[in-house]
Image (cartoon, helix red, strand yellow):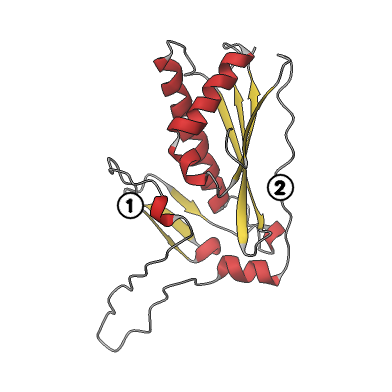
Amino acid sequence: MGQAGSKAVPDDSAAAPAVLTPVGFRVQGAAVAAYCAGGGLGARPPSRAGMRPAPMIIGLRTPGEDSMDKITPLYTATATASGGRNGHTESSDGVVKADLSLPKELGGPGKPGTATPEHLFAAGYAACFGGALDFVAKSQKKDASKASVRCAVSIGPREGGGFGLGVRLHIEDRSLAQEDLAALVRQAHEQICPYSHATRGNVDVQFEVLGR
């Protein structure tokens, strides 16, 4: 939506949402499974008898980091995961708890009743974007509090190496005209939603917008 890789595509017809290029990847193989279940950066050396090593602090810099947004933290949520993508994750207050399992599409067991990091990201982005949309609507004396936001998060190999994400958001509110809803979605994405700010320039985010 005004940014490369981020598109809001309202439909001229009120009967159907905009049609987007599908965002999806299907990956199999030991390499992906090894990545998803692997240890990662900053592994600590084994403990010496009777001693617990201090945490290792690592500073990682990415291109353009000097120009990234800085925030004044108002609220912080904390969660701890163990066992990687085949383990368990839980928030510090115990509100969010999930057993994890690598999907079969990624070479894992795909255990029934388990979640993936993509589930958690999709749920968070959908909720956050809905809040941003309602905030923008209220500032214009409109009501988008009952809008439905569905978020699909895909994972797969990046063209430049490693792995990346693709996001598709479907926003529906039949109480608002299509063009009005599309304008609200654009403003929420470009100006308000922190998930949109975090993914901009890094993740391909696409939109389906369906009003009346």
Q: As drawn, is 156 to the left or to the right of 50?
A: right
Does residue 57 lie above or below 45 as drawn? above
Q: Which mark is residue 24?
A: 2
Q: How far from the left and from the top, in percent, is residue 35?
A: 59, 68
- Position of residue 20 relative to residue 144, above or below, is below
Disc 2, disc 1: CB below 8 Å?
no
Residue sitting at x 67%, y 56%? 156
Q: Residues within 10 Å of mark 2 (few under 14, many from 20)?
A: some
Q: Is residue 137 above or below residue 126?
A: above
Residue at point 33%, 52% (across, down) = 92
Relative placement, left or right, of 150 versus 191 is right
The Cα–Cα distance between marks 2 and 1, rounded to whole angstroms, is 32 Å
In percent of the image, x 49 and y 17: which residue is there? 144
- Please state, as top left, top right, bottom left or bottom right, where the N terminus lies in the image: top right
Q: 53 or 67, which lies in front?
A: 67
Element at label 1: loop
Instruction: Pick the residue in front: 108 or 178.
Output: 178
Q: Nearer the viewer, residue 68 or 28?
A: 68
Disc on res. 92: 1
**In the rendering, at what x and y percent does residue 150 appear?**
59, 32
Check disc 1 and give the amino acid type. Ser
Secondary structure beneath dot 2 equals: loop
Picture coordinates of residue 80, whole percent (x, y): 39, 58
- Does residue 115 appear in this view? no
Specify the amino acid type for callout 2: Gly
Q: Earlier in the sequence, mark 2 or mark 1?
A: 2
Residue 142 seen in the figure = yes
